[in-house]
Image (tube, rainbow, N blue to C red):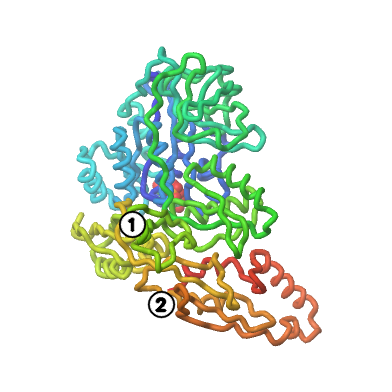
Amino acid sequence: MKHIRNFCIIAHIDHGKSTLADRLLDYTGSVTEREKQDQLLDNMDLERERGITIKSHAIQMEYVHNGESYILNLIDTPGHVDFSYEVSRSIAACEGALLIVDAAQSIQAQTISNLYLALENDLEIIPVLNKIDLPSANPEEVTDDIVDLLGCDPEEVIPASGKTGLGVDKILEAIIERIPPPKGNPDEPLQAMIFDSVYNPFRGIEVIFRVVNGEITKGQKIKFMATGKEYYADEIGTLKLTQLPKNVIKTGDVGYLISGIKEAKEVKVGDTITDAKTPTKNMIAGFENVKPMVFAGIYPVDTEDYEELRTSMEKLQLNDASLVFTPESSAALGFGFRCGFLGMLHMEIIQERLEREFDMTVITTVPNVSYLAYTKKEPDTPIVVNNPSDLPDPSKLDRVEEPYIKATIITKSDFVGPVMSLCIDKRGQITNQTYLTPERVELSFDIPLAEIVFDFYDRLKTVSKGYASFDYSPIGLRASKLVKVDILLNNQSVDALSALIHADNAYNIGKKMCEKLKELIPRQQFDIPIQAAIGAKIISRETIKALRKDVTAKCYGGDISRKRKLLEKQKKGKKRMRQVGNVEIPQQAFMAVLKLN
Ligand code: GTP
């Protein structure tokens, strides 16, 4: 145990965590020449393509220091605000954290929020000044910023570069010398915390755990405390780049477990594993429950795929404990699921993973946050509104409350004006403004969550020319004037297109939605009226004119390849369409409300 160190790497997005992790693996000889490739730990295709870390990853290294051999368990964590849940779980499995700060960008919003998470868990922080090879690096100034933030000595800050490998030796030395070994008692009954799980179609569910007390041996009969289910530890091992089977995983160490679990529901991240015969009395203090921020419907394009979609979502949920879903049905789309996500990026990723990993074609409906509504009849009993159709009729409605967040934005002083106008435009109220340095300002706002989950981040980047970082935390519910804007196509209300909108913006948004839908819905053989309505009142109207000529007519009958191309293009476009009544609606139309402006 004296020779184990469990640590994570935390940083603001793009400050170089994954690159530095590659360097650590390389330096400790944990990967062979053949296995080497960039961003080793970002092993999902999606992570590679987008260059971001979505899942946390655990990997074990061995390192000899002063003649003694150490085991280092590294847990790489994602940086995007949508995935902070992953960060909090990883942090709970560690004693220390490398805090990576980009020497050109300095401290950003998630540097601070992740640092707070680590400090709340009493982790030892090793500050790393990364990317010092960059010509734009500002090592002295950024070191001062770090010293101010942590209250540490300047000597404690390790200058490094994930690109050139500079400083990697110093980092490893610091991990061994500054991070305490795990505590735990090897003689107590087994108590291990599940901090991740992966679905493997061939081997069942792989559980990733950290042993807190006692030890786990191959073949041992174990029990998952939250579910009460018992299993045999068929295979246990450590996580190298591939899995390495072992006979025992000792106190303080991190490992994987395979025990023939096939049902996604049986594994709960945060659960405690113990011995079936002599169980521990104490469950490990649970994680914070994940609270989804955004809700949207996910429906199969082909109604027959509903059951398959359910199984796929269950499997995905195992790999991503922050995804929640419940069955729902829509008059327009049939059977599907109302899903909760941590944010819009999370939603996009789930949709893409469903398509790539499970070969599902799905339609996602307009996302909204979760409101509380109260009726006049029962003014003290809240109704949770996760779906526009849950909002009671306006005539019966007493009041609505919407979730607010505290937003923290760090930007350059030049952009304070534009950032403030954006926040005010989004119904925000400024609560604090602090100059961190003469050029860098921290702004705090109370702002409705609904206003920031959609395009806020993109707009913030635009108004600040990229020089703004952003983080948020929920601060509870406040009274709101909310209405449901319905859309009628061909005089028929399409429930999947309804959106919950603040009353002051409803007319404007209703009008823009009609215009946008006119653009997005393909013309058909007849005129299609598009109307926006609040209750029985029509607030806007557009018409998609009937198609007069066959589209292929413009090919003059001559150029056959062009004609075929056109047909193929049409066919492809059709893939993600839903027939509602006699109108065909493409996927983009369901998201139209997000792309207004
Ligand atoms: P997320 O996983 O998305 O949170 O990002 P990350 O913090 O893991 O950053 P990543 O390692 O993906 O690096 C972000 C970008 O910075 C990449 O383009 C890297 O090539 C580059 N980068 C990382 N480290 C260094 C460095 O030391 N020097 C220079 N010049 N570039 C670096």
Residue 11, visible in the rendered structure:
yes
Q: Nearer the viewer, residue 187 or 20?
A: 187
Q: Nearer the viewer, residue 29 or 518?
A: 518
Q: Is residue 18 left or right of residue 544?
A: left
Residue 278 at what x, y percent from top left?
Answer: 47, 14
Q: Nearer the viewer, residue 36 or 390?
A: 390
Residue 164, visible in the rendered structure:
no
Residue 240 at what x, y percent from top left?
Answer: 53, 30
Residue 543 at what x, y percent from top left?
Answer: 57, 83
The N terminus appears in which quarter of the rendering? top left
What residue is drawn where x is 75% and y is 85%? 553
Q: Quadrant of residue 180?
A: top left
Q: Hey, what amino acid is under mark 2?
A: Tyr
What residue is drawn where x is 31% and y is 34%? 121
What residue is drawn where x is 43% and y is 74%? 509
What residue is drawn where x is 38% and y is 36%? 91
Q: CA distance from mark 1 to mark 2?
A: 28 Å
SS state under label 2? helix
Q: Which residue is mark 2?
A: 507
Above or below, 488 relative to 104: below
SS state under label 1? loop
Residue 386 at what x, y percent from top left?
Answer: 45, 56
Q: Which residue is mark 1?
A: 379
Q: Hey, what amino acid is under mark 1?
A: Pro
The C terminus appears in which quarter of the rendering? bottom left
